[in-house]
Image (spheres, rainbow, N blue to C red):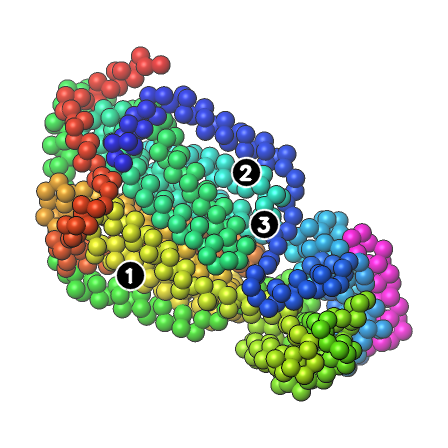
Amino acid sequence: MATFLYNLGRLAFRRRHFVALIWVALLTLAGVGAASAPAAGTTSFSIPGTEAQKAFDLLEQRFPGASADGATGRIVFKAPDGQKMTDADNKATVAKTVKELGGGTEVVSVTDPFTTNAVSKDGSVAYTSVKYEVPGMELADSTRESLEAAGDDARAAGLTVDVGGDALEAGAEPGAAGEIVGIAIAAVVLVITLGSIVAAGLPLLTAIIGVGIGVSTITVLAKALDLGDTTSTLALMIGLAVGIDYALFIVSRYRNELAEGRDREEAAGRATGTAGSAVVFAGLTVVIALAGLAVVNVPMLTKMGLAAAGTVVIAVLIALTMIPAMLGYAGRKIRPAGEKRKSSKERTSSKGQTSSDAATSQKQAKPNMGTRWASFVIRRPVAVLVLGVVGLGAIALPATQLELGLPDDGSQPTSTTQRRAYDTLSEGFGPGFNGPLMIVVDAKDSDDPTAAFGDVADGIKDLKDVVTVTPPAPNKAGDTATITVIPNSKPSSTQTEDLVHAIRDKGSDFKADTDAEVLVTGTTAMNIDFSQKLNDALVPYLALVVGLAFLLLIVVFRSILVPLKAALGFLLSVLAALGAVVAVFQWGWFSGLIGVEETGPIMSMMPIFMVGVVFGLAMDYEVFLVTRMREAFVHGESASQAVVTGFRHSARVVVAAAIIMMAVFGGFISSGESMIKMIGFGLAIAVFFDAFVVRMAIVPAVLALLGKKAWWLPKWLDRALPNVDVEGEGLRVHDDPAKGSDADEDRELVRV
């Protein structure tokens, strides 16, 4: 592996014009394709194998033309104090609004609140429902704008009017300002770490090119593959973070190789062969984690994972080819590690320094912060280990109170019209009104379908926590009917979940008595089924991802205990991150600092999503940090000294990479979309825990306690495993002390 990548790096360095041209051409091609691609539609939210999905599919089959998946909007009217919605003037105002809505495009139906009993008991609140032909994400902007403006006349007449429903849903828009701040922080960290603006610009440039190709490709395929905006956001988030980090690893190693006295082409080859090997295996762990989301069998998650994995693959390829090419263009503008800017006199006096002198000078350099920290941990491994484990364990405790759900209008900021409409409906009709359950009764095999419909409705009325049961609404064939049930509790409550299970449990009795099958669907039931499906898939997914990565890391490190330690450390960091997410987004601790206006259940996909993404990112630091330790150990250093050597070369870069990832992910916290905000915070805090606590403290402490045993591998397994040579042992044949950086600089003047 190292030899192949070494040759690839040198080839890219020499043929830099060709390599750069290929990537620029790919970016241009993807950009042109994205600009001319048809607009993406909605992402079909389906959950195969669940009762809610089965009922939804049955509705589309038995109620053709009803636009079962069409968007819905609600305009909620509230009368001024001392008035009622049934007053003549208010009724006339509402009637005018209903008429205007009915003439809009893409509208299937508009209800009149005074004929559908959509007025609260005290007469203060009324609402009208609008049904559209297409899902909310596919609505034309003009249609959405018409819905939002429909209540203007009613407001002018003195009524309080707010609009809710999924018809107002639009693409998730990340906080652009936050992203810019994140990239700016990344740029500052890169300049500090790499010592020059040119060196810092390379990771940013290549990461942006990689993300541009990845996101543009997703845009091109969005319509054909039914990809939503969240897919592009995730690919942007992860692609930008890993793209910068992978390039940083290679550029940093390149500067170290220059400091050892090697010429620039040789340094680029060795950096690609050693750090590039770590990048390949780190990228593989991320790809495994993201592509593994397919085992959950939720199409939306599968598409998100595969799209993000594709962006990571592009980031790896760019790091291995375009970075060496850019290093060739940069020439002497990128200085060796540790070399400060010299005056003209100093450069003249040091011009004759040999490569051996440079190497000796590098070795005699005083210990850096990484060396001092690693030495401290090795002297006190037990104390550091206990403090790290106990600290993360304490932060993880809130995760034991994790409540899962999907965001609805009730989780929107209180400043939004959707949230105000939600609260007004809860006030006028009860908290369960915002989460109605739809009961689908399939009486095709029943002798008396009409009687079966009535029996089901009567049976549900007797259940606990039921407020209203509407009369059955049969289809034209008379073999299927829908019944709407209004719970007494809000959609995200455990009482509503218990009611869904109670109806389903009673369904077996209905089946035995009437031969009619009873299915529960609707947004609330969908959310419950989705959460359950993700919970059931978490352990198999974790076993698959961690198992495959464990085998991969055995090959990389040629050790059993090091990969085991890496996996256990990851579990600790991801649990701590989930605990922090629960504390902020569910309990409300420090929520004001990141703009969380409303606490509630944690997004259902958050645990399994964090496991996938954080595991892949955590292994980045593990591979890059520990491969330098492994390299030092293989080259003859003691186990404890190898830990110090690994930190001397890698700690600064790993810390910089972690800060960059935190800045990139943290930039998404400013998003107005609650799901994106939660993902951004969760990933940023997980990177903090994993990089600064697990990899920088717990890992060296464990390795110090294990000593040589950390690198133990059974002889039979050692013989069976392929030798991927991540340490670059095979590159020793290329050692040529006679080559100096000055000679390379002279060649650069005449190379075409």
Q: Quadrant of residue 518?
A: bottom right
Which amino acid lies under the numbered mark 3 shown in the image of this protein?
Gly
> Which residue, given by chain and number where applicable, does mark 3 sit on?
228
For image coordinates 54% across by 38% down, the residue present is 216
* Contact, mark 3 vs mark 1 (Cβ under 8 Å): no
User: What residue is drawn where x is 80% and y is 67%?
Assistant: 477
Farthest residue to the bottom: give it.
Answer: 462
| Callout 2 touching callout 3 (CB < 8 Å) | no
Residue 226 picture location, percent across and down: 60, 48
Dot 3 lies on which element?
loop
What's under tag 1, amino acid-wise? Leu
Kindly state the secondary structure of the residue where label 2 is placed: helix
Which quadrant holds the C terminus?
top left
Counting the numbered discs, the total is 3
In this view, the residue in front, 89 or 506, is: 506
Q: Residues within 10 Å of mark 1 (few under 14, many from 20)?
A: few
- Residue 22 in the image, given as x and y percentages of width and height: 45, 26
User: How far is the residue under mark 3 from the one under mark 1?
Assistant: 34 Å
Q: Which mark is residue 216?
A: 2
Horizontal side, residue 486 vs residue 584: left or right: right
Whole-angstrom CA distance, mark 1 to mark 2, is: 37 Å
Label 3 crowd (10 A; few <14 / some 14-19 / many >=20): many
Q: Amino acid at mark 2?
A: Ser
Asked if residue 65 is positioned above or below residue 365 in the image, the reply reads below
**Which residue has dot 1 on it?**
568
Q: Position of residue 28 (x, y in %)?
A: 53, 29
User: Would residue 39 be seen by someone viewing this image from the given angle?
Assistant: yes
Q: Are marks 1 and 2 in contact (CB under 8 Å)?
A: no
Query: Is the magenta region chiefly helix, strand or loop?
Result: helix
